[in-house]
Image: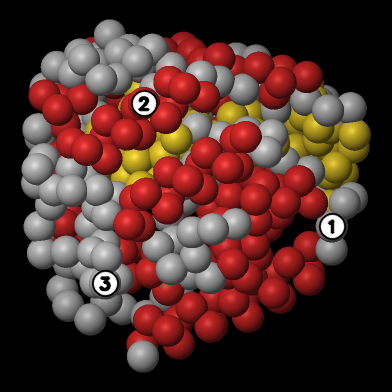
Amino acid sequence: MTHTTPGFVCAHHHLYSSLARGMPAPPLPTTDFISILENVWWRLDAALDLDMIYWSAALGASEALASGTTCIIDHHESPNAIEGSLATIAKACRDVGVRVNTCYGVTDRWSDTGQLSPSVSPSTKMSSAARRGLDECHSFIKSGGDAMIGVHAAFTCGDETLHAAADLAKSLTVGVHIHVAEGIDDISAGERLEGLAQDNWLLVHGVHLDRQLLGRLVHNPRSNMINAVGYARPAHKPNTILLGTDGIGANMMEEARLAYARLREDDVSQTPETVAQWLTNGYELFPNAKQDTVVWSYEHMENPWHTAFTTHMQPISVDVDGERVYEDGNFLKIDIQEIRRKANEQALRLFERLEA
């Protein structure tokens, strides 16, 4: 027996993370969230080029499709390959057959000399990299691209950059996609974004958010656990809650099961319907996903009490915008073996740069 659903929406992804699997160990121990960022992700961001960006996005998009996810909201950073990065991601997803809304995440943590700044404060002036990132968002959107204005996080941006991002988003009638109070180091995010955030903003994590902000909140349970930043208690937040993966694939049924387990651990009275609603809320950002169809190998996909406790549910076929793009384990628009081969080649190039 089978069951048909719309495509799923991954409300927060970092597609370039698909190249991070098996990357060399960081040069220094990672003992807290900041050291994870400095020794892993910020080093990786700085090593990316456009070839790496394309093949990582193609691999990530194909893995999303194979798990029934047809829409991805991506947050990208590559300080040494800013210009053209968003169009590259969009092309990779289009080639695979996945819808994507992307952004370039601006930050002032990179100095104008290309070095990691020792500290960023509210009074920090906008860096040239941040200005170029805003320009990349602006030009991509003006050319017809589907995107938001990206900001890494309040704690890595001065007020000038935060306000410039908010102003640009308003002028283009799009939202801002920003990590908010993910770790304790960003505890002041609520205070700095209060009065700036709008209803169309996408607030990611919110683990240590100490006040209500306008916008939708994206819960990333697996990432929060891996980075040991704490539990966001999303069921207690007044915002509309969505589900993301923070770059750890785009299997939304798997993420939803984990989200329910973590929710239930926090409050044993909670039921799977709560997480099912978080998953459904993704259609507010990507209503076109409702036009996509996924035929599943499991007949009870509409019942959260089934899906919360059932593994190995597989898509049989996926149609995006009326076009069959996946069927019986086969990708119909791309050569998946070529994508895996090319992505592996780019991962090895990336690892060489990290070890240099």
Look at the numbered disc 3 and give the secondary structure of its residue. Answer: loop
Res 123 quadrant in image: top left
Q: Are marks 3 and 1 in contact (CB under 8 Å)?
A: no
Residue annotated with mark 2:
167
Find disc 3 in the rendering and name its residue. 113
From this viewpoint, is residue 41 visible?
Answer: yes
Q: Amino acid at mark 3?
A: Thr
Q: Is residue 322 above or below residue 269?
A: below
Residue 334, labelled with which disc? 1
Asked whether the beta carbons under mark 1 and mark 2 sit within 8 Å of each other, the answer is no
Rendered location of residue 351, percent (x, y)? 45, 81
Quick one: label 1 or label 2, which is nearer the N terminus? 2
Circle 2: residue type: Asp
Q: Residue at x 75, y 38 (%)?
A: 315
Q: CA distance from mark 3 to mark 1?
A: 40 Å
Quadrant containing the N terminus in the rendered view? top right
Left or right: residue 70 compared with residue 78: right
